[in-house]
Image (cartoon, rainbow, N blue to C red):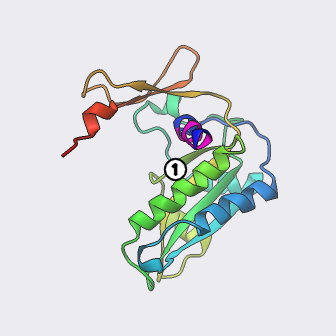
Amino acid sequence: MDNLMELLKSRRTYRRFEQRQISREIIDEILEAARLASSAANRQPLSYIVVSGAEKVEEVFVHTKWAGALPPEQGQPKEGEHPVLFIAVVENLDINKNCDTDAGLAISNMTLAAWNHGVGSCMIGACNKAALSELFGLTEDQALHTVVAFGYPTHESHVVDMEDEEQFKYYLDEKRDYVVPKRKLSDVVRWL
């Protein structure tokens, strides 16, 4: 379990990536992790679209917005920093129209499986869902939930204790690494 806690502590959101491809074996493991996620009533309403290859990734990238807490010039990956893989999480509405929890569990599994191999990720809900749905060829009984970007990160991301409730936004330090304030355990847990 110690390894799991280290994985959980170090898996953060990454937004700048090496232009190195992710092996098919790792991608398959990421997808298997998503498939194994718990699902409400075991209905399994999610499916996934894998977008790899520089041209296809770029087609998706142009419809995404990054790091909402930062100005675009700081948060948006620049040329040469883009992800090398996207996985779209698709809701199958005929199975379940309300599957945010299922999607969250699947995305968590995917990002942890990726990070286990040193592959960073960024969950992106701020995207042009209409344009991406068309690009992905989704039908009327499908809805795009999220796209998740993947790649080998070129920066670090650190958690620090939040000292002030008003200072919850992540920021870049002098090395352009992400600093992510988190509430202390004593601030979020109440025992009865």
Span highlighted in magenta in the image: 3-8
Residue drawn 59% across and 67% down?
36
Determine the main secondary structure of the stretch shown in magenta. helix
Is residue 157 visible to us here?
Answer: yes
Quarter of the image holding residue 151?
top right
Residue drawn 58% across and 63% down?
88
**Left or right: residue 142 compared with residue 32:** left
Residue drawn 59% across and 49% down?
112
Quarter of the image holding residue 163?
top left
Residue 93's x, y, as percent? 43, 80
Query: In the displayed structure, would residue 39 be above or below residue 16?
Result: below
In front here: 136 or 190? 190
Q: Is residue 4 magenta?
A: yes
Residue drawn 45% across and 67% down?
102
Going by the numbered disc 1, the residue's amino acid type is Met
Residue highlighted by disc 1: 123
Q: Residue furthest top?
A: 174
